[in-house]
Amino acid sequence: MKTVQRVIRDVPQHWVGDGFPVRSLFSYVGRNEFDPFLLLDYAGPHDFAPDEAKRGVGEHPHRGFETVTILYQGELEHRDSSGSRGAIGPGDVQWMTAASGVVHEEFHSRRFANEGGTLEMVQLWVNLRSTDKTAPPKYQDLRDDQFPRVVLPDDAGTVRVIAGELGDAKGPASTFSPINLWDVQLTGKAATTLTVPSGHTCVVIVQRGKVQVNESSIQAVELALLERSGDSVVLEAKSESRVLLMTGEPLGEPVVGQGPFVMNTREEIRAAIADYQAGKMGRLD
């Protein structure tokens, strides 16, 4: 069983743009202890009144990693300089591989802005190996009905497999390195033991309810980072709860970041800035 290494609690909320009130539960700044995961922002739940304003984050670049947006409530619209665009709703996921460089924007959909409602989402940054940071950009538009559901024993709950594998279920997301990304719904009727890869970084985020993660009690919105050794995680909720569990094989490479760029060296950061300024990552029409 993986041991809980530490728990992150009481993270203050701040705004990203004018559309995303987020708690940054972790980032790579200081030390890259969540390798291969770089950053996780949890947005909401936040109620927006009907508005004609275009809320969100305008045109900006990325290079060297992937952004994964899991939407629970609300509706978002995305477009980028590779020509990809789309809208996602509750249960959907967009997986954008910035890699060699892309310019994109993210806003509340026009319908959601006009009608108002509750926004709740997670955005995760996933690092890429140095050899994959020069890959062409890619966009995966993943819908809720694409994700297999695994029913847990003893009516303990269900797991949506977004990426990786759980038993015979394989998530539809394509990843550059071994990653599991599981959306876990717990009924509170029984404890459940999930098998996870030994050697992987393992993170459990409680989004709703209160959950015993091995020997530690975690509630919304809190995070447990587990030791890499061990091959199981025990989850026990006393009432209906939701958990995001993710594991990833560490890349073990240097991480140098500045704003929207995450590379391996300071020279690569300077090159990314120059390429963006020269228009080499494209523009939005």
Image (spheres, grey):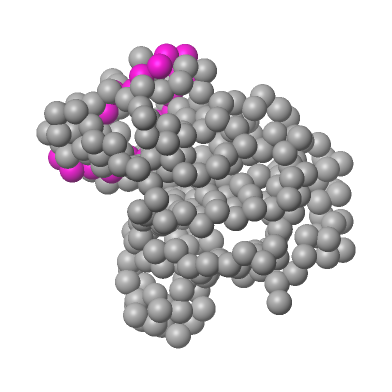
**Which residue is rendered at x = 46% and y = 34% of the image?**
164
Examine the structure image and report whether residue 172 is included in the region drawn in magenta.
no
**Which residue is rendered at x = 35% and y = 76% of the image?**
116
- Decide if residue 219 is in sight here: no
Q: Position of residue 73 (x, y in %)?
A: 34, 61
- The segment highlighted magenta reads 223-244
Q: Position of residue 175 (x, y in %)?
A: 57, 39
Left/right placement of residue 191 relative to residue 135 reads left
Q: Which quarter of the rendering shows the C terminus?
A: bottom right
Examine the structure image and report whether residue 233 is included in the region drawn in magenta.
yes
Above or below residue 284? Residue 114 is below
Q: Main secondary structure of the magenta part?
A: strand
- Res 225 → quadrant: top left
**Which residue is rendered at x = 76% and y = 35% of the image?**
131
- Decide if residue 71 is in sight here: yes
Q: Nearer the viewer, residue 20 or 2?
A: 2
